[in-house]
Image (cartoon, helix red, strand yellow):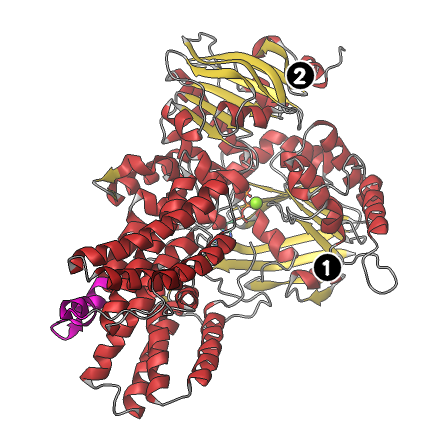
Amino acid sequence: MTDQLAGPAPATTTARGRRLPRLVVGGRDLTVQAAFVTLIVLLVATAALTSDVFLTPANLTNLLKQMVTTGLLAFGMLVVILTGGIDLSVGSVVAFSGIVTAGLVAGLPIPLAMAVGVATGIGFGLVNGVLVARFGLAPFVVTLAALTTIRGLAFVYSEVPIAPEDPAFFTLGSALAGPIPVSTLIMLAVFLAGGIFLTRTPAGRSIVAIGGNAETVRLAGINVRRHVALAYTISGACAGLAGVILASRVGIAQPSVGVAFELDAIAACVIGGASLAGGRGSTRATFGGVLVLVLINNLLNLYGVQSFWQQVLKGLIIIAVILVQRTNRVRT
Amino acid sequence: MILELRGVRKDYAGVQVLHGVDLVGRRGEVLAVVGANGAGKSTLIKILAGAQPMSEGEMRMDGERVEMRSPHDAHARGIRTVYQEMSLVPGLSVTENLLMGGFPRRRGGLIDWPAAHARARELLESIGFGAIDPRTIAGRLSVARQQMVEIAKALVDEPRVLVLDEPSAVLAGTDLEALFALIRRLRDRGVLVVYVSHRLAEVLELADSIVVIKDGRVIGSTEPSRTSENELIGLMAGRRLEQIYPARRADRGEPALHVSGLSRGGEFEDVSFTLHAGEIVGLFGLVGSGRSELALCVFGAEPASAGEVRVAGGPGGFRTPGQAIAAGLALVTEDRKGSGLVLGMTVADNIMLATLRATTRGPLIDFGRRRRKVAEMVERLDIRPAHCASMTTLHLSGGNQQKAVLAKWLLTGPRVLILDEPTRGVDMATRVEIYRMIDDLAREGLSVLLISSDLTEVLGATDRVLVMNQGRITGEARSDAVTEDEVLTYAIGRTA
Ligand SMILES: Nc1ncnc2c1ncn2[C@@H]1O[C@H](COP(=O)(O)OP(=O)(O)OP(=O)(O)O)[C@@H](O)[C@H]1O
Ligand SMILES: [Mg+2]
C-alpha cells in the first residue's frame, strides 16, 4: 500500500506530449519513489565516500538528533497543508515553548514543566485554528500574525537565554536508547502515529478531504471547522514538543531560536510532493523530505561550506527535487 | 475541409481506453459521437483538442498530417473545444474569461475595459446569449449560464472545428433552443461541429451523421434518417432496453418529510410540501427557478429566513447537513465537481465520505468492511471500470463520477433522498438502472424528491410532480394525469 493520501499521481506524459521514462512495477508507477530513494542513497554515498567524519558514530547520532526538530515541525505542517492551509508560526512556538519550559524548571518537576511547554504549543495552535476555521481568516495572515506575536511573547517572557542547572533537564534531548537518541524515536513515533491518523481514522480522512473540496465535505455532514481547527492544533502541539526537545538538547533556551524553521518544514512537505493547495501529500514522502534536507545540511557542514552558500545550495536543491517530481501534470 | 482520425489508440498508464478509432468529419457537418459512460468519448475529444496525446495513430486535416502537441496547436488550426467539465476561472468576470486570449488595449498597453465589455457583450449577443451580463463574476452564474459562457469562449475567434462535450447536459428550455440554433448557424457557415451527448432525441434532431463508440471502438456509424433512439441505445449498451421508466404504483405511505412556508431571501418563497414514504415526487422548474437552493436549504446546508423543515415524527430545523443526515436525509447535488466529489481522492474515499464514522473498529477505519461496502456499491450501480475503488475519482468518466456520488448517499441509508439532476451526463442504459433503483428504494419505503429539468424524466419516473417558477411552487399534479405542456405552462408562469 502506498501512503499517498490522495491526489492524482503525476501524469506519464508532459504537456508537450513527450514521454518520460517511468518505472512501473506491478502496474504501479514508482518513478517518484525511486527518484527519492536514489537521491537519498546518493547523498549518503557521497557523504560516506568523501568525508571521513560522516560515518562516525558521533556524526550519525548528531544527524539523528538534528532530524527531530525539522521532522516534528514537518509533520505538523503537513497536516495543516493537507487542509489547504499553512502554519508560519511554528518557529516562534518552538522558541516560546522552549523558554517557558526552561523557566518553569526552577519551580516545577521537569516532566510537568515540559508538559506545560507542549501545552503552550497546543494552545497557540488552537487559537490559530479557531481564527482560521471559525472566522474564515486567511491562514497565511493569521499565522503570520501569530509568528510575530508569539516571538514577541517569548522575549517578553525572558529577554535573555535561560539555562537550567538541573542535569535532568537535558535527558529528553540527549538520552540514547542503544545507538539511537530517544528524541529521534519520539519523532519517528509521531510520524508513525500521524500516518495512521491521516490514512486510517475518520478525522484524518476528513482533513485530507477538506483540502480537496471543503464544500463536498461539509455536505457530507462533516464538521469542517472543527477539523480545520484540529489540524492547526496538531501543528501547534508538534511545534511545542519540538521546542521542548530542542531546549533540552541544547541545554539552553533562547527566545531567538527557531527563526525560519517554518521554511524547512514547508520545504520538507513540498519536497515530499505535498500540494500547497491542499488535499495531496504523504507522511512517508514528507519524512523523505526531512531526510533530504537534514542530509544536505549535514553534508555541507562537513564540507565546511560557508553557511550563506549552504542556503543558496539548499534552495537550488529544493527546486531540482521538485522539478524531478512534477513532470508537468496534464489537465484532465 | 476534412478532419480525419486514423487508428487512434490511447492508454492511461498502460490501461487501454481507445482501441484504434477512425473518424471522419467534413466542413458544414454536425458529427455526433454517442456511447455509454466510459466508452471513451471525452478521451477522443481531448485528443482532438490537443489536451491529451494519442498513444498511436494519426490525425489529418485536409489530407495533411497534423501533430497536436498541446491545446495551443489545436487553437492554431482552428479547433476549439468545450469540455465536459467546466473550465472557466470562477473568480474572474465573464469578459475576462471570454477575452483571456487577447484584450483590447489602450495606447500604452493598458486594458481598455469599456471596449472589452462591449466586445464581450457583442459576442454573447451574436450567439444568442445576450441575457448574460459580461461584468458578472463567472462563478456567480448558474451552471447553465456558465456553460453558455464556456461556449461563447470557444467562438471568440471563428473556429473551423467546434468540439462540444455534452454541452446540453446542464441546459433546458430556451437555453437549449438557443444552443441548437447556434449550432445550426455555425454548421451553415461551414464549421464542423463534433457533438457528444447522451440525449439521443436531440442527437437525432441535430446531427448529420452519428458515430457510436463502445469500449473504445467505433461500432457503428449512421445517419439520423436511418436509425432510431432505440436502435442507438441497443448499440451502445450491447442489449435492448425494454422499458425506460418502471411502472409506478401510486399507493403512498405515511408522511415522511414536511416542508412548510420555507423562504430564503431572493431565492424562494413560502414553499410548502409533504413527501410520503414510498413516493417519488418530481420537482420541475427552469434553470434559475430556485430548485437547487431549496434543496440545499431543506438539507440544512443554507439557513432559511422563514419556515420549517421537519421529518415526520422526528427532528426538524436542521442547521447543518450533519443534523439532516442523522435525521435520514440525503442530497445528491447538481454540481458533482463543485460539491459532490473530492476529485483528488479515490473512488473508495469518496463513496465512504458521508459514512466515515460508520465503518470504524475502535478509533480506526475498518478497511476490510469498507472495501466490501465499496465493492457492493460499485457492483450495484455498475460503476466502471470495475476495479475503480482505488482510482482517483478525477480519472473516472463523467457518468461514472455521478454514480459514485449516488453510491455515497445510498450508503447513509436515507429515509428521504433528494436528487438534484441525478442523471446529468449519465447514459441511457444507466439512467434506466437509476430509475429502477429509485423505484426499488421507494418500494422499500424511501421517499424521493427528484429535481430535474428533463420533462420526460420528471413525468416518467415520478408519482407526483411539483412545479417551481421564480422561487414559488406554482403547480402540482399527478404525473400520469398531466401533459408536458401543462407542466411547462406552470413553469413559465403563463396560462396556455
Ligand atoms: N486521466 C485518466 N487516467 C486513467 N483513466 C482515465 C483517465 N481519463 C479517463 N480514464 C478512463 O478512460 C475511460 C474513458 O473515459 P472517458 O472520459 O473518455 O469516457 P466518456 O465516454 O466520455 O464517458 P461519459 O459519458 O461518462 O463522460 C474510462 O474508463 C475512464 O475511467
Ligand atoms: Mg465524457
Q: Secondary structure at mark 1?
A: helix
Quadrant (top left/top right/bottom left/bottom right) for the C terminus of chain A: bottom right
Q: Is residue B254 visible?
A: yes
- B52 lies left or right of B188: left
Residue at which label 2 appears: B484
- Tell me the subunit letter for badge 1: B
Q: Which residues are magenta?
A: A165-186
Numbered mark located on residue B30 in the image: none
What residue do we see at 48% from left, 50% from top?
A: B395
Q: Secondary structure at mark 2?
A: helix
- A183 lies left or right of B43: left
Residue at which label 1 appears: B75
Query: Residue B348: which quarter of the image?
Result: top left
Q: Amino acid at mark 1?
A: His
Residue lying at the far right in this picture: please name it. B107
Q: Amino acid at mark 2?
A: Glu
Residue B421 drawn at (x, y percent): 56, 29
Locate ligand 2 by image quadrant: top right
Residue A229 drawn at (x, y percent): 39, 45
